Amino acid sequence: MQTQGETSNPLERNIELSVSREKIETEVKQRLKRMAPKVRIDGFRPGKVPMKMIAQQYGHQIEHEVLGELLQQQFNERIGQEDYRIAGAPSFEAKNSEADNPNYEFQATFEIYPEVELGDLDSITINKPVLQISDAEIEKTLDILRKQRVNYEAVERPAQVDDRVNLDYEGTLDGKIFAGGQVNDYSVVLGEGYLLKDFEIAILGLSAGQEKTFEMTFPENYSGKEVAGKQVTFTIKLNKVEAPKLPEINSEFAKSLGVEDGSIEKMRSEIKTNLEREVAQRIQSKLKEQVMQSLLDKVVFEAPKVLIQQEADRLIEETQSARAEHGYPEDTNLPRDPFLEQAERRVKLGLILSKLIKTHKLSVQPEQLKNFIEQHAQSYENPEQVVKWHYASPKRLKEIEPLVLEDNAVSWVLDKANVVDQAITFDELMGYTHATA
């Protein structure tokens, strides 16, 4: 039995194995004897079935089981001798099945874990977003909250951006209505990007009761293949124009945000507290993203293909579950290739973080676990109940530990790295910068 050299995959290894035919035959006979009293075949009483018939019916299956067990046993012994760290399960390929050979010959192929060398992480530079919450951010948030609670009132004037309009439309391609080209009683808010730009421009300036016919060209990448990149003719009739009416900032508005006594001052204070928590979480998230990318850039190694394939399968399962939750039809044939890049990233980060945590003996302290749960609970209506729910189950606490451990690893890197403060605007951090279509 020899260990073969490296293949084109630097992590792949081959081991030659052989299992005695005589040993297999002996074990098969013993198992057939043990099962004989329990075998039931029509025409024979229990325990009286001839061994020849039992062997004919069950011998091949048992021989296969015994061969598999002995191969795995021998493989495990060899791996222990070679001190390999196996990634995934091995595959066994028969090399010699000639009847006159006293042994079954196999080649086991498997991958090993790579050696992950962290190197010098002091040279990593991380840009830390810096933002202080001021009255301007509070006012912007109030404006967003007001828009979320907007009401609309019918007006007798031409439609403009921010109005909600109701319309009927009919689109034709070469004189025929195309699929999805005819809709009645359709309501939409202008300026929110739900309509194609040319279609929305045609609506602006129309008043309730007016009609308009116009031509427009769909984008080349439009989802409707029938009209993608083609010129069509639309006729629209505007049924209603409604202007937005934002709620006033008063005690009733404060109560609608959960401030029981309707105090505007308390409302602003709570908004500021919530913003500070959200800003802190987003800054931490951006720091974490940079740390992870820096580790991937700095620590270069080959990841086991078998682990990447397994992770890709997990990503596919997550995608299928998410689709099902949103009511999309089941798709059991999602291709694996689009998931491989993300899967490789996950596998490599997992190996790097595992090495970092082990090398520097990072661990989860009870106080860290408590702080993590309490911060997470703040986004719920009853934080105290959420905290109690977590602590009511050791299993739930155990599930959170890897998240805290990952945060500890990020903090360790940040302590070593060159962290540079970088001013960021509120809109950039919160992702509010959005060009209107």
Image (spheres, rainbow, N blue to C red):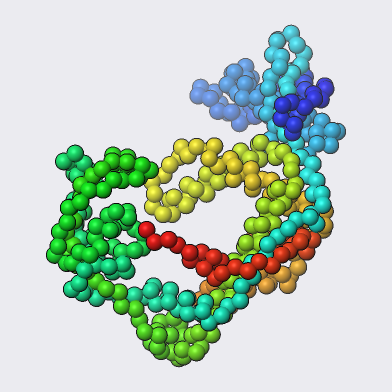
Instruction: Quadrant for the N terminus, please.
Output: top right
Residue at (66% x, 60% y) in the render: 288
Residue 70, image quadrant: top right
Residue at (54% x, 37% y) in the render: 337
In x, y percent, where is residue 198?
29, 54
Say above or below: 6 vs 360. above
Pick whichever, 11 or 179, lies toward us: 179
Say above or below: 146 vs 97. below
Q: Is residue 383 visible?
A: no
Instruction: Quadrant for the C terminus, please.
Output: bottom left
Pick whichever, 98 or 131, lies toward us: 131
Residue at (57% x, 21% y) in the render: 57
In x, y percent, where is residue 207?
18, 67
Residue 211, image quadrant: bottom left
170 lies left or right of 71: left
Say above or below: 247 vs 100. below
77 lies left or right of 281: right
Residue furthest out toward the right: 81
Pick whichever, 66 or 225, lies toward us: 225
304 lies left or right of 272: right
Q: Is residue 287 visible?
A: yes
